[in-house]
Amino acid sequence: EAGVVQSPRYKIIEKKQPVAFWCNPISGHNTLYWYRQNLGQGPELLIRYENEEAVDDSQLPKDRFSAERLKGVDSTLKIQPAELGDSAVYLCASSLGRRRQGIYEQYFGPGTRLTVT
Amino acid sequence: KQEVTQIPAALSVPEGENLVLNCSFTDSAIYNLQWFRQDPGKGLTSLLLIQSSQREQTSGRLNASLDKSSGRSTLYIAASQPGDSATYLCAVIPQGGSEKLVFGKGTKLTVNP
């Protein structure tokens, strides 16, 4: 079974430039998450999707960040314009969402390391 | 607000030693607790998931325990190997929230040959 796929793996841009990250979740996983991990910290949720619907985007800086999940499969996270403080690893995760069994196991992709100069 | 703390922040041990990593959380109302491994420059690999109704889970040389009432979990690694060197992250999913994982900052483990 293929895992969560993310691209690109690394991205270096100048501040004020736009950048986009792509995620393909595990087949059949209806829940998709975007997390941001700053250096030396644990990941923090940016947005969660249930199929096509963004059900929790309370931590997404909406002035510069946007996300979409067309057709409930792949997802794209965009930053425009990027700031120096956006340098971090952006992680995508997916879950089967087996809530009735009390299981919420999340599977993570390799992440995209963003450096803003 | 749920907070997760991991102690120690870093640990260095000789090969073959048994070791324990600690995780504590402030609110016992959780669905799951999950332990992850993160290698430098890589994503997170799920090691063990413990549901709130469970006390422990085992996988190979790893054993994770959960004491929900006291807000604690431990990850026990038996007979450590240099390949175990990585950062270990603990995370919980709080009940009644957005089903997001709340992470600790991790414990960086180095196993010396």
Image (cartoon, rainbow, N blue to C red):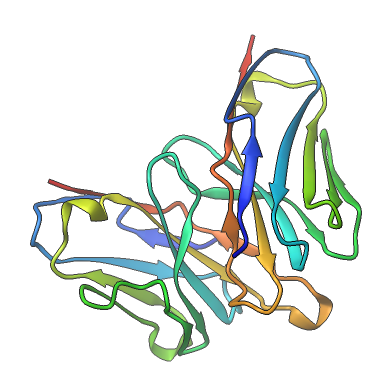
* Quarter holding residue A50: bottom right
Query: Is B84 left or right of B50, judged from the image as shown?
Result: left
Where residue B85 sits in the image (x, y, percent)? 60, 26
* Quarter holding residue B107: top right
Query: Is B71 left or right of B101, judged from the image as shown?
Result: right
For the residue pair A60 and B60, the one nearer the viewer reads as A60
Residue that appears at 90% across and 65% down: B53
For the residue pair B103 and A52, the one nearer the viewer reads as B103
Residue B111 in view in this figure: yes
Where residue A73 sits in the image (x, y, percent)? 47, 81
Looking at the picture, does residue A26 appear above or below residue A66? above
For the residue pair B55 and A70, the one nearer the viewer reads as B55
Where residue B14 sits in the image (x, y, percent)? 69, 10
Where residue B100 sits in the image (x, y, percent)? 58, 69
Looking at the picture, does residue B99 appear above or below residue B41? below
Residue that appears at 64% across and 40% down: B6
| Count of marks placed on residues | 0
Residue that appears at 49% across and 71% down: A33
- Location of the N terminus of chain A by quadrant is bottom right
Looking at the picture, does residue B85 appear above or below residue B69? above
Query: Is A68 left or right of A63, judged from the image as shown?
Result: right
